[in-house]
Image (spheres, rainbow, N blue to C red):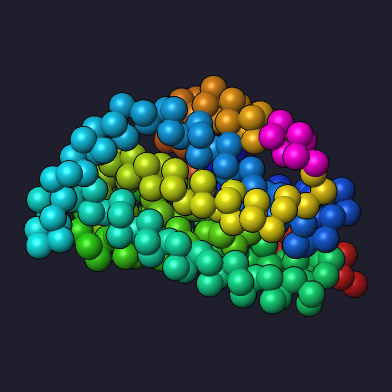
Amino acid sequence: MFEWLPVSSEGNIAIYLTAVEGLPPSAATEFALFLHAGTAMAATAYYRDEIAGLLRRLPEWRPSAPSATPEVTFLGVATLASGVVGIAAYATLEELFPVLAGGAFIVLIGVLLVATGLLQRLADARLGSREEPTLSDAVLVGVLQGLAILPGVSRSGTTVSALILRGYDAEASFRLSFLLSIPAAAGAGLLVLADGVPTLSPTAAAVAVAVSAVVGYLTIDALLRVVERVAFWAVCLGLGTLAVVGGLLTAL
């Protein structure tokens, strides 16, 4: 359910699994990523009418005139950019896992949470009126979404903030961000599933995804209303600072 809040659900789950359950950073990150498959299902169900409309427009798309179907172009290009950057970031993270033992992993998540909070603060209270996304918007947002595979980088926080800074209002930014989350979340879950979900049997993995999907669908409306009223940049800064301090104390 915390996927709908700009506080990095992956990062917070990874901190809990590492600090409380004692899982190694690699297993904690992979499990947190795997749960995104459930939120992809929830977002698909929630935005089913809009997805159907986009699919109906898909045959109209032409490489020679991508601006004729701006949202289709945005989602396609941003998803491609997300995939390229996300796979590269995940491969880099896997190389770093052996040196991210204990507190160092928690410190890294904390630093990335603070960075996410600062970006959200930069976009806070910005007003915009743009309606149609461009190719440059798609590349920028896609790259940021790909980087959100790193625990501590909030996917919704960074992509929504980037769109607001590019001139879109908050409502349009959230809509584009969550539509874009569907292929990204599904891809993250499949990426982990290809290697086998750590610590879970197939039955337990299926139950975890089902619970994530059901809870995500039931809470999306309420949590999106919460996002409009709470300064989550401050929440990210607070959580990030606590994670950095806690990680340093663990490492000592």
Can residue 251 be seen?
yes
Residue at the spot x=83%, y=70% of the render?
101
* Residue 175 image position (x, y, % from top left): 34, 39
Q: Is residue 225 left or right of residue 171?
A: right
Q: Quadrant of the C terminus?
A: bottom right
144 and 166: which is toward the camera: 144
Asked if the magenta segment contains residue 204, the reply would be: yes
Query: Quadrant of the rendered structure where residue 219 is?
Result: top right
In this rendering, position of residue 184 left or right of residue 62: right
**Most common SS among magenta residues:** helix
* Residue 129 visible in image: no
Name above or below for residue 99 compared with residue 153: below
In the depicted structure, whether residue 92 falls above or below residue 47: below
Instruction: Give the residue drawn at x 54%, y 37%.
Output: 39
Residue 244 x %, y %: 73, 64
Q: Nearer the viewer, residue 241 or 148?
A: 148
Q: Residue at x 45, y 58 (%)?
A: 145
Left-right relation of 134 to 78 = left
Closer-to-camera residue (58/135): 58
> How many circles with numbers are drawn on the protein?
0
The answer to whether 29 is drawn above or below residue 45 in the figure is below
- Is 81 part of what is drawn in magenta? no
- Chain part drawn in magenta: 201-207
Task: Tell me where residue 33 appears, x and y as whole percent.
Answer: 63, 51
Residue at image coords 78%, 48%: 16
Image location (x, y in percent) of residue 41: 51, 34
